[in-house]
Image (cartoon, grey):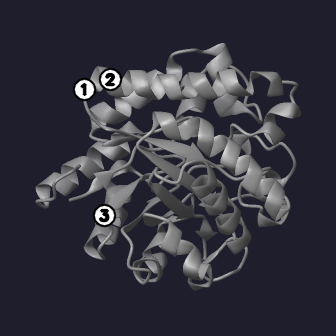
């Protein structure tokens, strides 16, 4: 049985929403285009996804305060959760995964706040999200310190909500997190999570990661991105997605080839990240069913 995640939200919003790219692109759209997030969730469910991932990945105080929007933190959180629930209710079935992305910046483990600060921020976020979702998803975890703080905060605030931890890996060496630390360095932290995944890295890196994820004995899987590379411009302050380019080879068919390879290695939770859309999820669903897998 396979749990099929949805695809990317931020890039899909960029494709569908009018206007110039903005550092808060996925958050700002909930103010400027209410209902668009729900429509994307609905499209992913219709494509065959069994999980809608809430549009809360970048909903952090550190992002909002830069643009004088921190006073809307709770309203934006409520809105994101409501749009996922509305899509699930309309579809009639499915799970909701509560996304918790990196503090400060993605792919940049050196920006991680001190441990106690990070724990408190993740606890606040988990406490708000957990009552409205089926599973908490700590995404794009780039270092051991990041993993430790996220897990501690989530377990502190929502000890009874399932927690999936998803790592972002070095694109050229899928055995290592973005910090350069090996997956094996996570150690006993993984005892506290319900599944171990990898996301927002090249699909080739996921191929390399599978044995290292499997070694922890937890349900495991991956959802890769379709970027050509993570550019130096995206690693600067307040980046926008227009500095990233998609891989022309990452068609739904080609991406599904990668996913089926992970499933052959034992992965049971798969889907797509940035630059994958409903067409990619539809093709994965088709291929999974053709191979005799049940999607749950």
Circle 1: element type: loop
State yes or no: discs 1 and 2 in contact (Cβ < 8 Å).
Answer: yes
Label 3 or label 2, whichever comes before in sequence order: 2
Q: CA distance from mark 3 to mark 2?
A: 25 Å
Image depth: mark 1 or mark 3 in front: 1
Tell me the number on the disc at residue 92: 1
Compared across the picture, whether 28 is left or right of 54 comes to: right
The 10 Å Cα crowd at callout 3, few under 14, some 14 to 19, many 20 or more, is many
- Residue at figure coordinates x 81%, y 52% from the top left: 233
Q: Position of residue 54 (x, y in %)?
A: 51, 36
Compared across the picture, whether 93 is left or right of 198 comes to: left
In front of the other: 32 or 139: 139
Q: Quadrant of residue 177?
A: bottom right
Q: Position of residue 76 (x, y in %)?
A: 66, 24
Q: CA distance from mark 1 to mark 2?
A: 5 Å
Residue behind mark 2: 89
Q: Quadrant of the N terminus?
A: bottom left
Q: CA distance from mark 1 to mark 3?
A: 23 Å
Tell me the number on the disc at residue 268: 3
Q: Is residue 291 above or below residue 122?
A: below
Circle 2: element type: helix
Q: Is residue 124 above or below residue 291?
A: above
């Amino acid at each position: 049985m396979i749990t099929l995640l949805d695809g990317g939200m931020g890039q899909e919003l960029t494709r569908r929403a009018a206007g110039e790219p903005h550092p808060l692109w996925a958050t700002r759209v909930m103010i400027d285009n209410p209902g668009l997030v729900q429509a994307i969730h609905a499209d992913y469910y219709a494509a065959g996804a069994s999980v809608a991932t809430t549009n809360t990945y970048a909903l952090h105080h550190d992002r909002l305060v830069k643009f004088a929007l921190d006073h809307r933190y709770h309203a934006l959180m409520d809105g994101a959760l409501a749009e996922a629930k509305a899509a699930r209710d309309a579809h009639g079935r499915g799970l909701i995964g509560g996304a918790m992305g990196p503090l400060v910046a993605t792919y940049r483990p050196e920006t991680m706040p001190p441990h106690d600060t990070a724990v408190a921020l993740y606890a606040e976020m988990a406490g708000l999200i957990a009552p409205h979702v089926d599973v908490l998803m700590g995404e794009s975890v780039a270092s051991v310190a990041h993993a430790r703080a996220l897990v501690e905060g989530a377990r502190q605030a929502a000890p009874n909500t399932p927690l999936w931890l998803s790592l972002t890996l070095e694109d050229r060496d899928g055995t290592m997190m973005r910090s350069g630390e090996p997956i094996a360095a996570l150690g006993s932290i993984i005892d506290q999570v319900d599944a171990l995944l990898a996301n927002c890295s090249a699909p080739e890196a996921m191929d390399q990661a599978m044995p290292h994820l499997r070694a922890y004995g937890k349900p495991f899987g991956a959802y890769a991105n379709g970027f050509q590379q993570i550019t130096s411009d995206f690693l600067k302050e307040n980046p926008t997605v227009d500095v990233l380019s998609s891989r022309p080879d990452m068609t739904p068919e080609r991406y599904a080839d990668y996913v089926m390879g992970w499933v052959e290695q034992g992965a049971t939770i798969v889907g797509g990240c940035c630059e994958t859309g409903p067409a990619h999820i539809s093709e994965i669903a088709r291929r999974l069913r053709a191979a005799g897998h049940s999607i749950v």
